[in-house]
Every structure is written in C-alpha cells, then in structure tokens.
Image: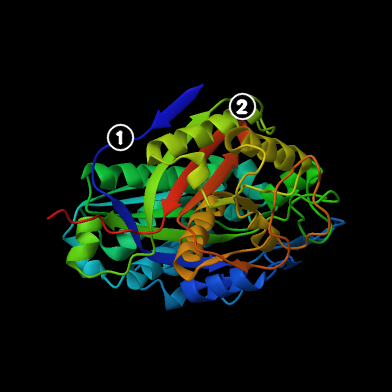
Amino acid sequence: MAETRGSDTGHRVVVTGVGVFSSIGTGAQEFAAGLREGRSGAREITRFDASGFEHTNGCEVTGFDPAEWIRRTPLELLGEASRFSVAAARMAVADADTDEQRLAGLRGLVTIGTTDGEAADLDQLTAADLAGGPAAMDPVRAARLPAARLAASIAYELGLADVEALTIATACSAGNYAIGYAFDAVRAGDVDFALCGGADAMCRKTFSGFYRLGTIAPEFPQPFDINRKGILTGEGAGVLMLESLESAQRRGARIYAEILGYGLNCDAYHQVAPNQESVGRCMELALADAGVEPSEVDLISAHGTGTKANDITESRAIRAVFGDEPPRTVSLKSMLGHTMGAASALGAIACALAITDGFIPPTINHVETDPECGIDCVPNHSVPATLKVVQNNGLAFGGNNAVVILGAYEPEEVLL
C-alpha cells in the first residue's frame, strides 16, 4: 500500500479565498446559505440528452455565465470543466482580496483535481469523428480534451508565469489530492501561494457508467439512510487560495481556516469497492500529519455517496478510528450530488465555511439511519456549532483515498 505523510515542520498554511460553483449556490456566501438551509441541487438533467434512461435526475450548476469570469481566454478554447475551474480560480483570487497582477510577481502553484477532465466534449463526438481518427476531428474540440487544460487554463487566464500547473486525475478524491499537494508546497516554502481544488462537468459517459453499475438513484441521494438507492451525478468547481500564515498576516487577509494536515494512500484493493482498513489508515495518516487526536475532531465531512458499499465501509472505518461515539458525520452529496473530482474540494470549502460561520450542515433526504452505519449524520437540518477541527474525507475508485484536516485559525501565543 502506498502512503504519504507531509513534513512535521514548515509554514502554517491558511485558506484566504474560495471560489465555488455548485448546484446549491455560487460563491462563498450563497454556498454557505445553501449548506445551512439544506438546499437540494437535484433536478432533471439538461446538460446532455438523458432520454432512454429510466432515471434522469442530476445536480447541475444553473445560471453560470463563463463570460462574467473569463476575460482573457477565448471561451471556445475551453470545455465546460475548464470554464468551471478558471471561473472558480478567479473567484477565489477576488475573494482573497488580491489580484492577478500581484500574484504574477510571486511563485505560485495551480493544482486541480478531476475525474472526467473534459469528458463532456467526448459526448459531442459522432461515430464519423471516431471512425475518421484524429485527422477528422474538430481541432478546437480536440485541443480542449486533455485534462491538463483544467489547471493550465487558470495559469494562462490569470497571467501566472512563475507557476507550476498540475491537473491530478485520481477520480473522486482528486480535490483533496490537489489540496494536499498545494499544502505541502506552501508549507515547505516552495511557493508563495497556491490555487487548488477540483472541477468536473456533467457528462453522459460518467452518468451512463454509474447507471450501468446500478448506482443512480431514482430521485435523490440518501446517504446513510437504510432505504438509500444510490447517487446522483453532479458538477461544479471548488478552488481554494492557500498561502502561508505570514503572508496572510502581512497583507491583513481574512482567514477562513487553517489546513492542519492530510493523508493519502492507494490500496488498489478493487476497481470500485472501498477497503475499510485502508480508509481507516488514511484517516490515521491525516490525523498524525495534523498533530490531532481523534478526540479533538468536531465534525467529519464524509465521502458519503449514498451507496451501501461506501456508506457502511466508510462508517465502519470511522468507528474503528474514532470509537463507538464518533464525531457527527455528514454527507454533502445529499445536497450536491456526486460532483466527482470537485467533490472533496467543495467539501473542504464547506468545512472552512462551517468553521467560520459556526454551523454543521445537514445530511438531507434522511428518514432512518442504517443501523450498520451507527453515526449521527445530522438529519435534514443544520445545527449551530463551534468547530475547532474538521475532517474532510475523499475516497475514490481504485482505492485512491485522501483525507484533509482543517482547523479554526488560532493565533500563536506570544511569549514575553
């Protein structure tokens, strides 16, 4: 089993800006309101032709105008996922109360996680396109297909020259992988700032794949519920602006939360089934990297897909690490659907907002908790809470697990 832990020394790393496009809200304020209200993003799919499928609900982003956020890059050169990632990055920069001119003079990192890359473009390819090979393809569309565009397009759009741009394609935990990579770079002092997160757009390929697996819910997802019937596919982007605490203090930046640590592992146990021991081990790695005891965690944002395999395995892993009375454990996918590579990035932003605004978002659509799960999933209604430490889980096909630990920003004591 491959495992990764970060260094125990280095700069403190804080979140100073967030960019959000989701089915329940755009931007930090609206997203937080959607989480607090337990808003559902489930609606009829319009992103592609879903006729022929018995169940046709998904969680799409509505009201997204890329021209409002993308000013330098010709829109025809960007697929929908790249549009999401670029817009969310620009929003994060603005939310951090900085600008691209300042960032252009700094050492930076752009890292975006994804499951599908620009797979929505594949939906538009015809049989003739495929039969004719590369020579027959629309060159503009062909240029948009590489997943690397999700990160590289951000660097181009913001005019960032001294920057590494990396797209991480570790499926549904990719957002947390990107955050962990960025955290290490800022903590070590290798970069002055990082824009990190995840993005994916709804596509027929992924919807069809999950449908064939029998995991698409008829109406809405019900994570941890005994009567759950599966997932809804979703879309969106979440991008976080990370910088060192010293940098944030120098410019008087607002601090949402501190990234305390993370853990990664890959067990390659099964193509789609999670492994309880491996999931638990990843949580232990993250807690150790953060220097946090299990008893100090106030909330877990679970991967929480709403499938029996995930919910029971993840819940048992949580109980193995945290004991018979684990922290409240919620699933944002009950509201957002499964946003693939954006999922754990949106989860990390939700954790930061929950810390800042003092609440625990609910697991909606909940009727009766599966006794095999044995957790408090905060059914249907958010609750006020003072949160010091929050854990954000990301689990993916192939056993790619990633867990990020966030904490309330607490200034260091000054010794006189």
Q: Position of residue 356 (x, y in %)?
A: 44, 67
Q: Is residue 258 above or below residue 322?
A: below
Quadrant housing residue 156: bottom left
Residue at the (69%, 35%) spot, across then down: 316
| Residue at the left extreme, as displayed | 416
- Relative to 336, 55 lies left or right: right
- The foreground one among 300 and 311 is 300
**Residue 175 shows in this picture:** yes
Which mark is drawn over residue 277?
2
Of helix, strand and loop, which one carries label 1? loop
- Relative to 402, 41 lies left or right: right
Residue at the (25%, 58%) spot, across then down: 160
Residue at the (27%, 50%) spot, across then down: 12
Of helix, strand and loop, which one carries label 2? helix
- Crowding at dot 2, Cα within 10 Å, few <14 / some 14-19 / many 20+, comes out as some
Q: Amino acid at mark 2?
A: Glu
- Relative to 263, 300 lies left or right: right
- The foreground one among 333 and 359 is 359
- Relative to 207, 398 lies left or right: left
Q: Which residue is mark 1?
A: 7
Q: Position of residue 394 (x, y in %)?
A: 56, 44
Q: Earlier in the sequence, mark 2 or mark 1?
A: 1
Q: Is residue 183 above or below residue 330?
A: above
Give the quarter of the figure containing the C terminus.
bottom left
Which mark is drawn over residue 340?
none
In 3D space, how far apart are the residues under numbered discs 2 and 1 (Cα atoms)? 24 Å
Q: Amino acid at mark 1?
A: Ser
